[in-house]
Image: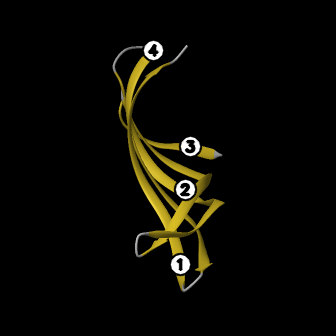
Amino acid sequence: MNFRSRHYVVQDNTLLYGLVGYQNTKFEAEGFWNGTSVGTDDDTFGGLRLGAGIEYMTEANTSFRLQYHYTAYSDKTYNYPGYTEKWDGHDSTIELGLAYNF
């Protein structure tokens, strides 16, 4: 779920906007010790997603977008035989797109 807020018009055909949302993603992991698998796990993590973008209208119905997103997922500690691993997940994404408005 993402919410987009358009805040500032730079020119008649250029728009800056902010993004706020919640991201829910399933991750799968496998732990190895000395080349041997010691366990697998999968979890679904959620977190706050923030971003910003710029949109440039090329024609009445067509525009190009450039967006950046940062997501900070919840943390988790995994306990495998012989060791413990803490997962502190986050990701960054840059997107370039072409939009056609009907």
Q: Which residue is mark 2?
A: 49
The residue that label 3 is drawn on is 4
Q: CA distance from mark 2 to mark 4?
A: 28 Å
* Left or right: where 20 falls relative to 64: right
Spot occupied by residue 99 in the image (x, y as percentages of width and height):
45, 23
Q: Earlier in the sequence, mark 1 or mark 2?
A: 2
The residue labelled by disc 4 is: 61
Q: Where in the figure is residue 31, as x and y percent of width and height? A: 51, 69
Q: Which residue is mark 1?
A: 86
Q: CA distance from mark 2 to mark 3?
A: 11 Å
Query: Which sits earlier in the primary sequence, circle 3 or circle 4?
Result: 3
Q: Are marks 1 and 2 in contact (CB under 8 Å)?
A: no
The label on residue 40 is none
Disc 1, SS: strand
Of label 2 and label 4, which has the lower sequence position? 2
Element class at badge 4: loop
Task: Sort mark 4 into few (<14), some (14-19) or many (20+) by Cα contacts within 10 Å.
Answer: few
Q: Position of residue 2 (x, y in %)?
A: 61, 46
